[in-house]
Image (tube, rainbow, N blue to C red):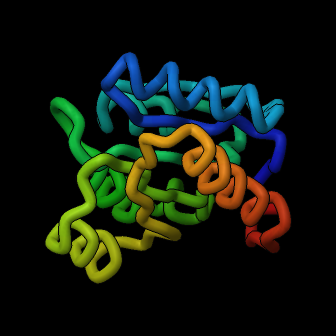
Amino acid sequence: MSKSGPILILEDDRDDRDFMEKIFDFLKVSNERIYFENGLEAYTFLTETNKSTFLIFSDVNLPGRNGLELKRDIDNDPVLRAKSIPFVFYSTSANREQIDEAYHELTIQGFFKKENNLADAKKMVGTIIDYWKLCKHPNM
């Protein structure tokens, strides 16, 4: 895993994308950010790219293939699973059923509820990125 690789963000809401960019700019995140509107687009990218992905932030509710379905596809693909790409849900929706499914049936590394307050959102996203920059990982 390259800590300089792209960050994939699955987000279909333009306002939320702009909000995330404000956060990344404030945090001076130099990683390329690649946005997808649904899980199928992201899965296609992951299976076709030679880039080593640093981190995936995924909304749960997306049109077409949602975030939970994308993570299930990654877990079921031996090549993608072996890449051990850190995958966190960052979603407005964080109900008990989705959280239970994410942790009990999938291999995720975190489930975070989006913050509407810019200061709180910067702190949360910054903590997630800092953690993965420091974390030892099988594909380093």
Please state the horizontal and vertical placement of residue 56, each as a whole percent of the image. Answer: 54, 47
Please state the horizontal and vertical placement of residue 30, each as a whole percent of the image. Answer: 82, 31
Q: Quadrant of residue 36?
A: top left
Please state the horizontal and vertical placement of residue 112, each as a whole percent of the image. Answer: 44, 60
Q: Residue at x 48, y 68 (%)?
A: 110
Q: Is residue 22 left or right of residue 129?
A: left
Compared with residue 75, is residue 19 higher up or lower down, i.e. above or below?
above
Q: Residue at x 42, y 72 (%)?
A: 107
Please state which of residues 13 and 120 is positioned toward the viewer in this rendering.
120
Quadrant in which the N terminus appears:
bottom right
Please state which of residues 41 and 93 is positioned toward the viewer in this rendering.
93
Please state which of residues 14 and 53 is positioned toward the viewer in this rendering.
14
Compared with residue 16, is residue 117 higher up or lower down, i.e. above or below?
below
Q: Is residue 92 left or right of residue 57?
A: left
Q: Residue at x 36, y 56 (%)?
A: 71
Compared with residue 76, is residue 32 higher up or lower down, i.e. above or below?
above
